[in-house]
Image: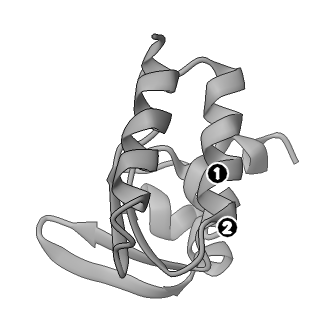
Amino acid sequence: MSSGEKKLASIATVLSMKPDILIFDELTIALDPKNRRRFINVLNSLKGTKIVTSHDLDLIYDTCDRTILIADGKIIFDGDTKTILQNKDLLENNGLELPLSLQRR
């Protein structure tokens, strides 16, 4: 099984337990573009509460309504994902860059 297939199997196993909350940590790390897109589609199709931790800001932009930006163990911003991820100064002041999809605009 590929890395992506193993991750999908793991998610299926967890979903069979019908959890109230799903937590994903760096979900797309080491995935090729096709499997990355599959995971985004799966994540978007899941109902309920999902907590996603990631440095993949394009993933966050494509999947999350609310984002909490944490730097040095402190909450810097908590709110609308698009508001946070379109704010170049806020991101750069906290060691991040605009998502790649927004850099091309």
- For disc 1, the marked residue is 42
Q: Does residue 14 lie above or below 20 as drawn? A: above
Quarter of the rendering occupied by the N terminus: top left
**Left or right of 19 in this view: 61:** right
The structure residue drawn at horizontal position 76% and vertical position 51%, both measured from the top left corner, is 102
Sequence order check, earlier mark of 2 and 1: 1
**Mark 1 neighbour density, 10 Å: few (under 14) some (14–19) many (20 or more):** few
The structure residue drawn at horizontal position 60% and vertical position 42%, both measured from the top left corner, is 39
Residue 70 appears at what percent x and percent y? 27, 70
Label 1 sits on what residue type?
A: Val
Can residue 61 be seen from the camera position used here?
Answer: no
Can residue 53 be seen from the camera position used here?
Answer: yes
Residue 36 appears at what percent x and percent y? 62, 32
Kindly state the secondary structure of the residue where label 1 is placed. Answer: helix
For the residues marked 2 and 1, what is the alpha-carbon distance in whole angstroms? 24 Å
Instruction: Tell me the mark number nearer the camera, choosing from 2 and 1.
Output: 1
**Left or right of 15 in this view: 17:** left
- For disc 2, the marked residue is 86
Kindly state the secondary structure of the residue where label 2 is placed. Answer: loop
Nearer to the camera, 76 or 7: 7
The structure residue drawn at horizontal position 44% and vertical position 35%, both measured from the top left corner, is 9
Residue 91 appears at what percent x and percent y? 47, 61
Farthest residue, direction front: 16
Label 2 sits on what residue type?
A: Gln
Nearer to the camera, 89 or 96: 96
Q: Does residue 29 lie above or below 32 as drawn? A: below
**Mark 2 neighbour density, 10 Å: few (under 14) some (14–19) many (20 or more):** some
